[in-house]
Image (spheres, rainbow, N blue to C red):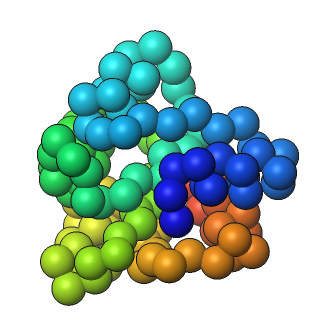
Amino acid sequence: MHLKLVKVVLSAAGHRVSGARGATQAIEFLNRERPEMIILDLSLPDSDGLTLVRRLRSDPRSVKIPVLAVTFYPERYTREDAIAAGCDAYIVKPISTRTLPYLVTKVAAEK
């Protein structure tokens, strides 16, 4: 699911959505704002998603923000590796537009 579609689906479900196109933009965003959740595609153009999660978990400002990991490459980014890096949930693409709002609500409630 692409960023635009994620924004449309989650906005329609009542969530406020912001986006970043890579680890650098994500870090810049997190320096300015505190989101309620991070939906992180593990395949980033400028960094490995697991490296970014580890960085987020080592920062007191983002350590408690729930992270939902998303990947199209489960053989490269396994559930076990994502959870070990600090992700709170993991899902493999393609993601159903009906499933995503449910997962976001569930992960947020569990954190």
For residue 7, above or below residue 17: below
Q: Residue 64 sits in which quadrant?
A: top left
Query: Visible in this render: residue 50?
Result: yes
User: Is 91 on the left or on the right of 24, as rendered?
Assistant: right
Furthest residue to the top? 32
For residue 75, above or below residue 109: below
Across the whole image, how many numbered discs are drawn on residues?
0
User: Is 102 on the left or on the right of 6, as rendered?
Assistant: right
Q: Which residue does the image show at 50% across and 58% down from the upper left?
A: 2
Q: Which residue does the image show at 20% across and 85% down from the upper left?
A: 75
Place of residue 29 in the rendered image (x, y in percent of width and height, measured from the top left):
42, 23
Place of residue 18 in the rendered image (x, y in percent of width and height, measured from the top left):
57, 34
Q: Which residue does the image show at 73% across and 57% down from the upper left?
A: 9
Q: Residue 30 sits in which quadrant?
A: top left
Q: Quadrant of the C terminus?
A: bottom right
Place of residue 93 in the rendered image (x, y in percent of width and height, measured from the top left):
45, 77
Q: Which residue does the image show at 40% across and 53% down from the upper left?
A: 40
Furthest residue to the bottom? 75
User: Is 26 on the left or on the right of 101, as rendered?
Assistant: left
User: Is 97 on the left or on the right of 88, as rendered?
Assistant: right
